[in-house]
Image (cartoon, grey):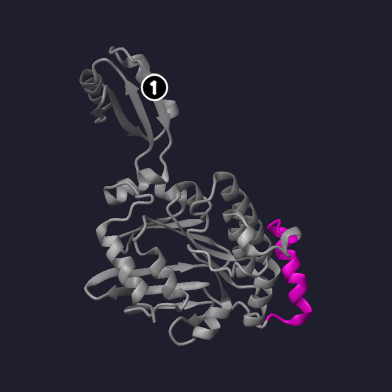
Amino acid sequence: MTVQSRPGPMVEVDGLARSFGKIEAVKDVSFDIPAGEIFGFLGPNGAGKTTTINMLCTLLKPTAGNATLNGFDVQHDRSDVRRSIGLVFQQPTLDEHLTAEQNLRFHAYAYAVPRDTRNKRMRELLEMVDLWDRRKTPVRNFSGGMKRRLEIARGLLHHPRVLFLDEPTLGLDPQTRRLIWSYLLDLRERENLTIFLTTHYMDEAEHADRIAVIDHGEIQALDTPAGLKSLVGGDLITLGTPDPVAAANEVREHFDIEADVADGSISFKVPDGGTFLPGLLRSLTQPVNSVGLRPPTLEDVFLHLTGHEIRDEEVGAYDQMVQSIGRGGRH
C-alpha cells in the first residue's frame, strides 16, 4: 500500500525532545522539511541524530514536543507514518540467509505492495543499484557496499514519501559512497523523494539542500551549506614565515586583521582570499616560505559553532551513556 503525499511540509518538528532519565539526548528541536528536499543532520556520534530519527520514525516516543510526517502525527498516526517512510539504519538489518530478491519480496509483503506492481518495482530498484544479476545470491555473500545498496533498494520498494538515511555510507570506501549517492540523487529527481540524512562525513553533508548542525542534542545552526560556511568569516589564508609574530603584526597594521600564530605560520580569514592575497604578498616585508588558501569547509563551520572538531569514530563517555540508555529505552 502506497501512502499519497499530503499538503504542507513533508516533515514538521516543533520543540521535539527526548530524555533518558536525567540525560537530555534531544533538546527542543524544531525544523520543517519541504517535499523533495535533501535535509541533513550534521554532528558527531551521540549528538542526538539517531534519537531524533527514531522519534520521527515512531521507534521512540518523544518526551516533549510534536512532529508530523506527510501530514501524519508521529505519536497518533504511527501506521500511516510508517507507510510513508523508508529506513536505512546504521547497522545492517537484512536477513543474510535469504537472497537479495527474497529480502525485497518479504518487505513487499510486509508493506502490502500490490502484486501487479511488486515484481516491476523490485526489478527497477535492483537494476538501479546494479544488483539485478545478483538477485538470487544469498546476502551473506555480499560485500558491505552491496548490502547497503540492497538496503536502500528495500527502503524504496513501497514508494515512501521520505527516505531516512542514518549514516548511510559509514565504513564504506569512497568509491562506493560516491556510487550510492549517484543513485540517491537520481531517485530524488525522478520520484520527488524527500531524503533525511544523518552523517558526520563532511563531503556527504554537501549533498544536502539544507543542513542542521547538531551537537549535544541541540541544533546550533540550520542553513544551506553555503549559508553555513558564510558564518565562518571567509577564506582561510595561511603563510609560512621565519618570523610569524612580525608577519602577524604587519597584517594587523596594514589590513586591521588579527592573525593566529602557530608552528612557524600565521593564519586568518578574509571574505575573498583570491582577490586579497596578491596585495597582501606585495605589502609584506617579512619573507614568506609558503602560502595556503582554501575556502571554508563544514568542518570549519562545526568548529566555529561548537568550539570543537567533529568527532569521527570516537564517542565520549556522555555519548556512550546516551547510546547505552537509548538501546534499552526504546518503546
- Amino acid type indicated by mark 1: Val
Residue 269 lies, with reference to residue 7, above or below; the image says above
Query: Could you tell me which quadrant the N terminus lies in?
Result: bottom right
Q: In this figure, which residue is indicated by the disc labeled 1?
A: 291
Q: Quadrant of residue 211?
A: bottom left
Residue 266 lies, with reference to residue 70, above or below; the image says above
User: In the shown orientation, is residue 38 left or right of residue 76?
Assistant: right
Pick whichever, 152 or 230, lies toward us: 152
Labels in figure, total? 1
Pick whichever, 113 or 184, lies toward us: 113
User: In the shown orientation, is residue 212 left or right of residue 188?
Assistant: left
Q: Secondary structure at mark 1?
A: strand
Pick whichever, 316 or 44, lies toward us: 316
Residue 184 lies, with reference to residue 229, above or below; the image says below
Q: Is residue 51 magenta?
A: no
From the top left corner, tell me how far across and down residue 63 is, in percent. Answer: 31, 79
Q: Residue at x 37, y 72 (%)?
A: 327
**Main secondary structure of the magenta stretch:** helix
From the top left corner, tell me how far across and down residue 56 is, in percent. Answer: 45, 74
From the top left corner, tell me how far across and down residue 308 is, in percent. Answer: 28, 47
Task: Tell me if mark 1 has few (under 14), some (14-19) or many (20+) residues whose alpha carbon lies within 10 angstroms of its own.
Answer: some
Q: Residue at x 65, y 56 (%)?
A: 183
Pick whichever, 276 or 160, lies toward us: 160
Q: Residue at x 54, y 79 (%)?
A: 82
Query: Could you tell me which quadrant the C terminus lies in?
Result: bottom left
From the top left corner, tell me how far across and down residue 30 is, in percent. Answer: 37, 69
Highlighted range, magenta: 113-132
Q: Is residue 130 magenta?
A: yes
Q: Quadrant of residue 248?
A: top left
